[in-house]
Image: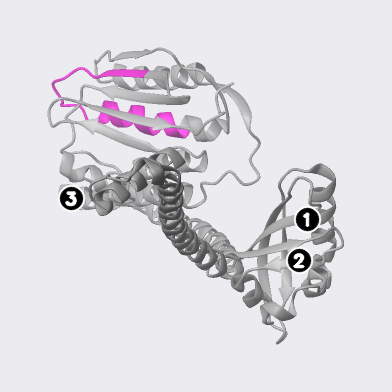
Amino acid sequence: MAPTAQKLRVIAEAFLKKNRGKAGAAPAKMDKDRMLHELQIHQIELDMQNDELKRANSSVETARKIYTDLYDFSTVGYFTINQEGIIRGLNLSGAKLTGIERSNLIGRNFRTFVSTGTLNSFDGFIEGAFEGGAKTSCEAVLIKKDGAQVNVYIEGIVSGGNNECSMNVIDITDRKLADEKIQSLVLKLEQSNKTLEAFAYTVAHDLQSPLRTIAGFITLLEQQNKGVLSSEAKEHMEFVTTAAMKMSKLIADLLSYATMTDEGKTLQVIDLNGVVDNIFSEVRLEMKKDGKTPSLTRTGLARVKAVNAHMTQLFQNLIYNAVKFTAPEVVPEVYVGAVEKDGEYILSVKDNGIGIDEKDYGRLFDAFQKLHGENEYPGSGIGLATCKKITQIYGGKIWVESKPGKGSTFYFTLGKNRVV
């Protein structure tokens, strides 16, 4: 901070006193000496003020150079234009967007660099900036001197009183190209998925027919050769029939997984309490045959916007898994609940089953990734993969918390704004 005039005077008087020696002027010379003293003090003050001004000017020049460099070499093009579009000022980055020297751009109309196809958008931007007084924006295409096109994003605001618009012009060509590439890849992926779905449907349909033929002829052979076949032959036929049924189930599950989508499906308001209750009823009937009465409870379920078949399949897979992966000597206990946390609806299916090792979490939701042998727990290995796909369709996710022998809890969300 620069010294005040009073401080400068004190410093000057001290300096003069130090260099003058002892004060011993005669009384007759007092006025002359006092005047000389004042002049000397004033001269020293001026010298110190001059030094301070030089230091201040140096600081200002350094700051100005830093600002100029930041202004000129910014990655953003800065333009100042009037209401007609005449360029009043710009930085080097702005000049680079046109391919013309900065000195040759002052006084030219910015509109001459805007492509015909985006000129209406730019004119609307200018009109909005000067009429509204608020920051406005648009996208446009600039035509450089060499004919090259530059996609730009422009935002600007009219400064108060000077009737000029300050514009930030950002080159978004790379982003546009990346967006177009992404859109192209998405389109190809969608086409590939449709082709895959059609292929899966055709394969599944065509495979089901020979499997039905195999199973039918095995049954016919058994009927025609009743009392003739040996016990070993009967056992072999049973193996063939069982394998055909397993293959048929696997194909059906694969087809369901491959064609799982919400395209063409109508969303409905679904009461999840009713969906879960229906599944509970089916489970109780099936387990009654085994002489077991499972504990099946639910709380906190809501009404959601979804496809009924999706919600049924999602809860079916999780609840039936909870019952299936229970030790033979244990009576299944399944609890279905939901909580709202941070604006998101989190559902859960908890069981008292055999549990899952944490090292297996990563592959649990992948298709055909079975953690147990077919003899222990039969199945296609697609159930949890289907659950994952359904939650993703609705913008949600699914995960598990479990310990071996301590049961498992599967959590999942259906995305926000699904609850009615």
Which amino acid type corresponds to the residue marked 2 in the rendered image? Arg
**Left or right position of 129 against 317:** right
Rendering quarter of residue 146: bottom right
**Left or right position of 393 against 371:** right
Residue 324 among magenta residues: yes
Residue at mark 2: 88
Where is residue 39 drawn, in percent x and y?
46, 51
Local crowd size for mark 1, using a 10 Å CA cut-off: few (<14), some (14–19), many (≥20):
many
Q: Between marks 3 and 2, how big is the CA–CA gap?
A: 102 Å
Residue at mark 3: 230
Answer yes or no: is residue 155 visible. Answer: yes
Residue at mark 1: 164
Q: Which of marks 2 and 3 precedes in the sequence?
A: 2
Q: Between marks 1 and 3, how big is the CA–CA gap?
A: 101 Å
Query: Residue at 74% of width from left, 43% of height from top?
Result: 134
CB-based contact (under 8 Å), mark 2 and mark 1:
yes
